[in-house]
Image (cartoon, grey):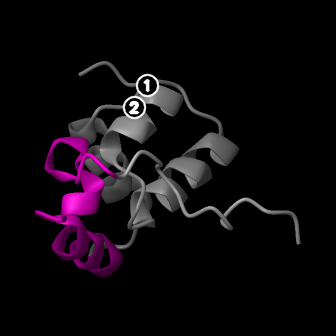
Amino acid sequence: MKRQQLTAEQISRVIEMAWEDRTPFEAIQATHGLSEPQVIALMRREMKASSFRMWRTRVSGRKTKHAALRSPEVTRAYCYSQYKPR
């Protein structure tokens, strides 16, 4: 797997998106070009081992993290209030 060069800001955003319940891996791939296995590898590399295990347990099989498992009624990748200026 070819390693894509991401800035620290992009890596931070990918990690944030990966932790969000409503952001599917497909959205990460569309915005940053990283497949699900690449996101997993990035999370393993950038996080503490205990945090990575907690994240993997959380997202494994979660319907909202995989577009194919989501309800077709859900067309957004994030909560409406998520990106409102504070």
Q: CA distance from mark 2 to mark 1?
A: 4 Å
Q: Residue at x 28, y 46 (%)?
A: 41
Q: What residue is shown with label 1?
A: 33
Q: Is 45 in front, or is 37? A: 37
Residue at x 65%, y 36% (from the top left corner)? 7
Callout 2 amino acid: Gln
Quadrant holding the N terminus? top left
Residue at position x 27%, y 49% from top? 40
Please provide percent x and percent y for residue 56: 21, 67
Left or right, 60 with respect to 21, comes to left
Please report contact status of discs 2 and 1: CB closer than 8 Å, yes or no: yes
Q: Position of residue 70 (x, y in %)?
A: 22, 53
Q: Find the magenta span and give its range.
A: 50-73
Identify the image quadrant of residue 58: bottom left
Principal secondary structure, stretch drawn in magenta: helix
Q: Please state the total of marks drawn on the protein image.
A: 2
